[in-house]
């Protein structure tokens, strides 16, 4: 065999192989490489978006937590204020009730004092009447003395 013929035939075979590879093998390989590059780029972009969303969610959750703590503090403050109001209302109601009971007791005491004074006046009037009766047994005019005793009784009231 001749070296020139071998070299030329190898060059032609290599050229056909390159043409075949460029025409039929290379485009699907390039397409697969481009698709893989696109998938990788999309994955990286999705990772970046996820990272940003995670940071945003973390920021939002910290804000929500902060707001919840603030609202809880407000609720506790309102509850303490309402408890103080309830205690004050109870004190006020107890004072009103105590005043009402005190007024009732004073009225009852005044009534008892008045009744005791009336009973005492009647006893004094009876005693005066008994004493006057003993004195008047010696005198004759009972009507004049009865009028006198009635006026004394009125003065004692």
Image (cartoon, rainbow, N blue to C red):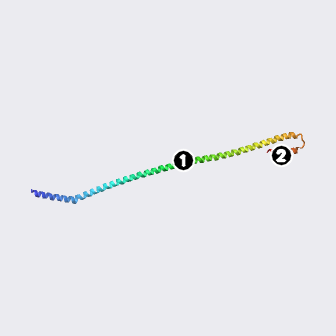
Of the 4 image quadrants, the one containing the N terminus is bottom left
Residue where numbered disc 2 is placed: 151
Compare marks 1 and 2 and give the one earlier in the sequence: 1
Name the side, left or right, on which 61 lies relative to 152: left
Residue in the picture at 55% in, 48% down = 81
Please provide percent x and percent y for residue 97: 64, 46
Residue in the picture at 88% in, 45% down = 144
Please provide percent x and percent y for residue 150: 83, 45
The single residue placed furthest to the right in the displayed view is 140
Task: Locate residue 140: give its quadrant.
Answer: top right
In the displayed structure, would residue 132 be above or below residue 30? above
Residue in the picture at 37% in, 53% down = 52
- Binning the other alpha carbons within 10 Å of mark 2 as few (below 14), some (14 to 19) or many (20 upward) gives few
In the displayed structure, would residue 13 be above or below residue 82? below
Residue in the picture at 59% in, 47% down = 88
Of the 4 image quadrants, the one containing the C terminus is top right
Per the image, label 2 sits on a secondary structure element best described as helix
Question: Can you tell which mark lies on residue 29?
Answer: none
Name the side, left or right, on which 110 lies relative to 81: right
Do the numbered discs 1 and 2 sit on residues whose CB atoms are within 8 Å? no
Please provide percent x and percent y for residue 141: 89, 44
Name the side, left or right, on which 126 lies relative to 52: right
Please provide percent x and percent y for residue 116: 75, 42
Per the image, label 1 sits on a secondary structure element best described as helix
Foreground of the two, 157 or 41: 157
Count of numbered badges drawn on the protein: 2
Question: Can you tell which mark lies on residue 80?
Answer: 1
- Binning the other alpha carbons within 10 Å of mark 1 as few (below 14), some (14 to 19) or many (20 upward) gives few
How far apart are the two marked residues, 1 and 2, measured between alpha carbons? 70 Å
């Amino acid at each position: 065999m001749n070296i020139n013929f071998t070299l030329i035939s190898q060059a032609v075979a290599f050229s056909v192989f390159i043409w075949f590879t460029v025409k039929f093998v290379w485009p699907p390989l390039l397409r697969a490489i481009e698709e893989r590059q696109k998938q990788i780029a999309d994955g990286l972009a999705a990772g970046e978006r996820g990272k940003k969303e995670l940071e945003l969610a973390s920021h939002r959750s910290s804000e929500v937590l902060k707001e919840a703590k603030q609202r809880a503090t407000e609720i506790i403050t309102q509850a303490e204020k309402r408890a103080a109001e309830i205690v004050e209302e109870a004190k006020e109601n107890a004072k009103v009730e105590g005043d009402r009971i005190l007024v009732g007791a004073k009225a009852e005491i005044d009534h008892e004092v008045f009744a005791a004074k009336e009973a005492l006046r009647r006893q004094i009037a009876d005693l005066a009447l008994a004493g006057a009766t003993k004195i008047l047994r010696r005198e004759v005019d009972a009507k004049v003395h009865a009028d006198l005793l009635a006026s004394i009784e009125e003065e004692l009231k």
